[in-house]
Amino acid sequence: MELTTVWFLLIAVLWTGYFVLEGFDFGVGVLLPFLGRDEAERGTLTRAIGPVWDGNEVWLLVAGGATFAAFPEWYATLFSGFYLPLFLILLALIVRGVALEYRSKSDSTRGWDHAFFWGSLGPAFLWGVAFANIVRGVPLDARHEYTGGLLDLLTPYALLGGAATLALFTLHGAVFTALKTTGELRERARTAARWTGLAALVLGGAFLLVTQLMTGAAGTWASVAVAAAGIAGALVATLRGRDGWAFLANAAAIVAVTVTLFGGLWPDVMPALDPANSLTVHNAASTPYTLGVMTWVAAIFTPVVLAYQAWTYWVFRRRLTVTR
């Protein structure tokens, strides 16, 4: 297997890990004003992700760094053409992180809770918009430079992608909250999972169907089916009170959605509306030497990072009880 293919797959894995892990962080933030009826309950919700949210964001940093090193042309075109959406995502993530760190140190948490909510909702929606545009294709010239404007990124298909990821991540946050809490907060999270699950099934199904018809490969029909089955399985498991299975089923759905997107993208990394100007894994890649060095570094350090993060989740695995 060529190293360009290896690094395309590794970057897909990094984005998958980011969406699975950071997805429930976003979902908890979006659900905060709806599930937390008082300060004690909102504090419990933030404590549920407190030990892990910053570790989950490492996946985004590594995905960005890997893209810069392995496919510099892709990185340059993406960050220049999607400058404003990506800047808004970065700003939202900063605001969200500050809110999580400072809400416990402030006498009044209302402002921080609003910041946490919007800092979670924004990226949950905008990541869907961004990836929908990447998969659909954008206007690029012969030098692989983006020639469109902001409105070119806000097509109905892209907005559907944003709504789909928002619904899917909100469902992920609901099943995670049900898994991590007890009492009324847990029951409220289960109710939220039922409603958001239906929304994710409708919006996600529509988005994946359109994506598959536009850019999908024959093999990605299987991942579309797995995504639908995962969301449906999360709903069924929630109705039966099996919170752990609900979380795993929805995580499988997120994995399947990401596989569908990257499967439809291959061998391009940044399709152009004019196929002659598209960036591919070959014309966007670094030198073989760079890819070789990166492969050795990834082989050595990736297992260490995964082991540390798994240990963190194991240590903080217990359910939380609302204390007033």
Image: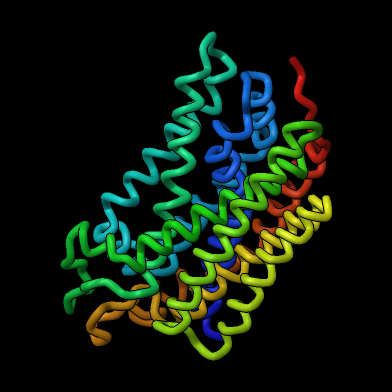
Q: Is residue 281 left or right of residue 170?
A: left
Quadrant in the picture for the C terminus: top right
Query: Horizontally, is 232 left or right of 105 in the view?
Result: right
Is 229 located above or below residue 309 in the figure?
below
Q: Which residue sits at x=44%, y=84%?
A: 213
Q: In the image, what residue occupies the spot 62% across and 19% down? A: 39
Q: Nearer the viewer, residue 119 or 101?
A: 119
Q: Is residue 294 visible?
A: no
Q: Residue at x 49, y 77 (%)?
A: 209
The N terminus sits in image quarter? bottom right
- Decide if residue 319 is in sight here: yes
The one of 71 and 101 positioned closer to us in this rendering: 101
Viewer-closest of 219 and 270: 219
Q: Is 22 placed left or right of 268 in the picture?
A: right
Residue drawn at x 20%, y 68% is 145
Residue 50 figure quarter: top right
The color scheme shown is: rainbow
Q: Position of residue 185 (x, y in %)?
A: 72, 33
Residue, far bottom: 218
Report the label total.
Answer: 0
Q: Position of residue 279 (x, y in %)?
A: 32, 77
* Residue 3 x %, y %: 52, 79
Depth order, front residue of 300/181:
181
Dividing the picture into quarters, in which one does residue 88 lie? top left
* Residue 121, image x, y percentages: 46, 43
